[in-house]
């Protein structure tokens, strides 16, 4: 047997490197890295810088573009941003607070501080503020509304130097294809301009009261939430309508917008400014959509049934007959108004809209159905 002197010997201890060796290696690595990046920096500094591409100088803007830019700069001081406020009750303190409710657009009507917007912009508000183009903000008071035409008038106490009334045009001579511009504050983004054309004329939309607003302008200029109450302008910068509604399954712009025609605006806003409300055309008949339509269907005819007549009214003087109840309790239908000035009417709203076209002091030709027999009556129209 060979004797191994190391068979029972303990294993040799590991050899320890000097502690300073690690610091030497780290310092060496740091020096190499610093040298490398210094070399790269000097190399890049010495290398030629790649120049940007040559900018092609464009010529003058097109005449149409210049006209649009100039028009926008001209009218934007007349357009305002409206913030509506609503009352909320703090559940902990029971204090009533006014918090932002919504936003909309509007425009300056005159140098007395009257602001025109949509009724639905301020419909649920307890207060409102108006921000001008120079970002000055003023509390607004409500002068009056005409919900049946989606119109509202506010007033601010602002210096006249800051008030720039919008110039008024006409909607009677508009043509499909005519260029239009819409200015407003969609989604709270103020001073927004969109352009388009008159897509159609003579449209009818429903107001907040259910009465139809007629002769509405349809446009493809982009109108989004917040544009409501803003102006629709022609290429001369004249007001031709108030942006009021869109047709969209999603609630955002889908290519179809509507504006209340300026002729309607110019007819009723001065009345609201002067007396806080509008004067409605009337002949003194009392109508009820629900009751009247039910009886009309039973009769198998079309039109608007007269439920009652105000004593001494034009309808009373003309001998129109109201619906009555017989001695046996049966209902005796009154006259049925089937047309106004040759225009068929099938609802209370259509009848009211037809009357509104009558000039103050004018008269209308009614086509009636009385006890199954046609009857034509000319009757005066009053304003109340």
Image: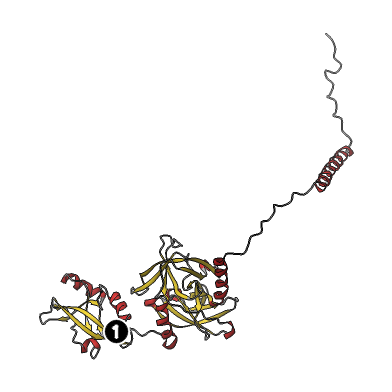
**Circle 1 residue:** 282
Which quadrant of the figure has residue 361?
bottom left
Left or right: 54 as drawn, with respect to 98: right
Q: Secondary structure at mark 1?
A: strand
Q: How many marks can you see?
A: 1
Residue 100 position within the rendered picture, expressed as x and y whole percent measured from the top left: 52, 73
Tell me if I can see residue 334 in this picture: no
Q: Is residue 312 left or right of residue 249?
A: left
Q: Quadrant of residue 139?
A: bottom right
* Residue 5, image x, y percentages: 87, 16
Query: Measuring 22% from the left and 83% from the top, which residue is drawn there?
Result: 308
Above/below status of 7 relative to 135: above
Nearer to us in this view, 116 or 64: 64
At which x and y percent is residue 188? Answer: 53, 68
In this rendering, the answer to whether 380 lies above or below 25 is: below
The structure residue drawn at horizontal position 44% and vertical position 79%, both measured from the top left corner, is 152
């Amino acid at each position: 047997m060979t004797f191994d002197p190391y068979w029972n010997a303990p294993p040799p201890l590991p050899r320890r490197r000097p502690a300073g060796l690690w610091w030497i290696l780290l310092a060496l690595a740091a020096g190499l890295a610093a040298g490398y990046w210094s070399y790269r920096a000097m190399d890049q500094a010495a290398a030629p810088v790649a120049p940007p591409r040559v900018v092609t100088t464009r010529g003058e803007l097109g005449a149409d573009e210049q006209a649009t830019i100039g028009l926008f700069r001209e009218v934007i001081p007349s357009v305002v941003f409206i913030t509506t406020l609503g009352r909320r009750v703090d559940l902990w303190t029971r204090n009533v607070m006014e918090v932002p409710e919504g936003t909309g657009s509007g425009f300056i009507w005159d140098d007395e501080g009257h602001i025109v917007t949509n009724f639905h912009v301020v419909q649920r508000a307890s207060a409102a503020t108006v921000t001008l183009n120079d970002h000055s903000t003023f509390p607004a008071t409500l002068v009056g509304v005409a919900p049946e035409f989606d119109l509202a008038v506010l007033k601010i106490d602002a210096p006249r130097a800051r008030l720039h009334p919008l110039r008024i045009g006409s909607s009677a001579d508009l043509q499909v294809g005519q260029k239009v511009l819409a200015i407003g504050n969609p989604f709270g983004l103020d001073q927004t301009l969109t352009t388009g054309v008159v897509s159609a004329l003579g449209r009818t939309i429903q107001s907040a009261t259910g009465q139809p607003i007629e002769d509405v302008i349809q446009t493809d200029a982009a109108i989004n939430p917040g544009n409501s109450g803003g102006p629709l302008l022609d290429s001369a910068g004249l007001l031709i309508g108030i942006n009021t509604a869109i047709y969209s399954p999603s609630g955002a712009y889908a290519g179809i917008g509507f504006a209340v025609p300026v002729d309607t605006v110019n007819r009723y806003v001065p009345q609201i400014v002067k007396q806080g409300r509008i004067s409605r055309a009337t002949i003194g008949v009392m109508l009820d959509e629900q009751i009247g339509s039910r009886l009309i269907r039973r009769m198998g005819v079309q039109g608007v049934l007269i439920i009652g007549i105000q004593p001494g009214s034009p309808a009373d003087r003309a001998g129109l007959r109201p619906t009555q109840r017989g001695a046996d309790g049966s209902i005796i239908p009154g006259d049925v108004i089937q047309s106004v000035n040759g225009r068929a009417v099938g609802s209370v709203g259509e009848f009211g809209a037809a009357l509104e076209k009558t000039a103050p002091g004018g008269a209308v030709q009614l086509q009636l159905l009385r006890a199954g027999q046609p009857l034509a009556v000319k009757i005066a129209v009053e304003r109340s």
